[in-house]
Image (cartoon, rainbow, N blue to C red):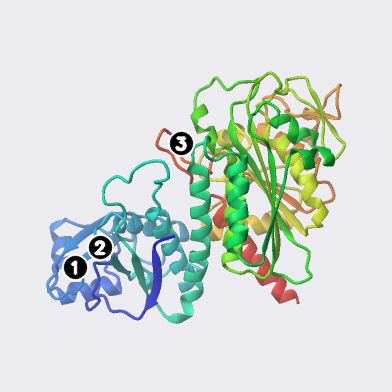
Amino acid sequence: MTLEFSLDSLEADSCEAGCIVVGMHDKGALGASAARVDAASGGHITRLIASGDCTGKTGNSLLLHALPGVRAERVLLVGLGEPGALDVARFQRIAQEAARALTGLPAQLAASFLGEIEVSGKDAAWKLRTQALAAAQHAYRYTATLKPQGPGVRLKRLVFAAAASAAQGLEQARGMAIGADFTRELANLPPNICNPAYMAERARQLAAEHPGVTVEVLERADMEKLGMGSLLAVARGSANAPKLIVLRWNGGGAAKPYALVGKGITFDTGGINLKVQGGIEEMKFDMGGAAGVLGAFLAAVELRLSVNLVCVVAAVENMPDGDAYRPSDVLTSMSGKTVEVLNTDAEGRLVLCDALTYVQRFEPQAIVDAATLTGACVVALGKHASGLMSKHDDLAAELLAAGENTLDRAWRLPLWDDYQSQLESVFADFANIGGKGAGAITAGCFLARFTEGRRWAHLDIAGTAWSEGRKGMSTARPVPLLTQWLIDRAAADADSR
């Protein structure tokens, strides 16, 4: 992360910066800092409102240059919508618009006064964190395999007008932004670079750069000894060997760890059930769950959270060749349960089931997996919410609350035993797909068979991990949700000690 954040006690009219950000409500109601700028400039903003040149509608913005009486080179006037306290979704939209505009300017130093706006139920630290994360997101540029176009983002430092007591919000934003950038870069890389070996190397590098982090990479022979027949079957058709990556952070003393598990299909052709519907070029993002849990792990380490954390990534490529696994194969998983393969394009659950079995050796107090698992979840929830499934109401509530707090939202889907009958098989303990109906739920039901007796939740991020289309990029979700959940767990554990 190259963008720096800081706090200072500033006044909008006397702040010397390349740009300052102030807000105005609809119908011409100016925020406190906007009113100060208006007064210093001899009513310049008031005249623009009267002439109809600017409104305060949510998400609108207007850039003003060289206002008389104002020391900043530019003033970015951002619409706040109807007067009164904002809800969290509206404030995030405002923060996103301000960040988009700022990162497109030639200014290297900017200052934001949006923290003075009241947001229902949220404190100054949350407002600062939301703004900083939006700025970091818009400041990210992918340049790994292309030459930068134009001057790039010139903003180097963003100062927030706020009291020092809100500094925790910026510290959390810094950690989350570092984790999110790690996730974006990993997921955006092409699959000829980001293969299982590359992911393992990045994990080793992460451990080397952060004292207290340990890493272990299991090779094919290690997984064969463990009996990971399900994961290894998916890997059989690829020239790139599978890796099971295990990262650990021990910041919580003798407490049992929390566990994050990620699906890391670095490219998914569908296998023998080759994808023919279009969009196959987007399947480099099928390791979005792995990238997301690695980013959340890194964020937790950067924040030095007082939790023990284990992160397991199953990195595999799903390719068709003469040794590829087939529809009607029966696989024996690490758990000993057998699975009839009805579709080789339902490979994520076959990889995850062995990873979920493996992570239980660490006796985690909770397991959360993240996976770009099903197109059915995209049909159900679109691109706005991740699908959440769990048999544990308390764990589901924790994750939902973390998603609402960060606006990296999830929606809970049922995981009733009624759906399990769709996975029945006459040739194995069960099949890897459950038919056309409730595809996201039956995928969760499949994973639930490998987490019995464990406090576990599943996040289907197939709709939220990346933006669709030829120019779509990684969103870094669910890094904010998972990091907030770990922050909350650290706080709750400290309170219980």
What residue is shown at x 30% (from left), y 67% (from top)? 110
Q: Nearer the viewer, residue 461 or 253?
A: 253
Which amino acid type is shown beneath numbered disc 2?
Ala
Q: Quadrant of residue 364?
A: bottom right
- Circle 1: element type: loop
How packed is label 3: few (under 14 Cα within 10 Å), some, or many (20 or more)?
some
- Rendered image: mark on residue 107: 2
Residue that carries the numbered disc 3 in the rendered image: 468
Q: Which circle's residue, 3 or 1, is located before the other in the chain?
A: 1
Nearer to me, 497 or 385: 497
Return the x and y of residue 189 as percentages of the image width and height: 49, 41
Q: Are marks 2 and 1 in contact (CB under 8 Å)?
A: yes
Q: Disc 1 residue type?
A: Glu
Look at 48% across and 48% down and name the residue there.
185
Q: Residues within 10 Å of mark 2 (few under 14, many from 20)?
A: some
Relative to residue 26, is residue 145 drawn left or right? right
Disc number at residue 73? Answer: 1
Q: Is residue 309 visible?
A: yes
Q: Secondary structure at mark 3?
A: loop
- Residue drawn at point x = 40 percent, y = 69 percent: 5
Indicate the position of residue 370 as horizontal and vertical percent values.
64, 46
Alpha-carbon span between mark 3 and mark 1: 37 Å
Kind of residue sitting beneath label 3: Glu
Quadrant the N terminus occupies: bottom left
Cα separation, mark 2 vs mark 1, equals 9 Å
Q: Earlier in the sequence, mark 2 or mark 1?
A: 1
Query: From the viewer's perspective, is 399 left or right of 69?
Result: right
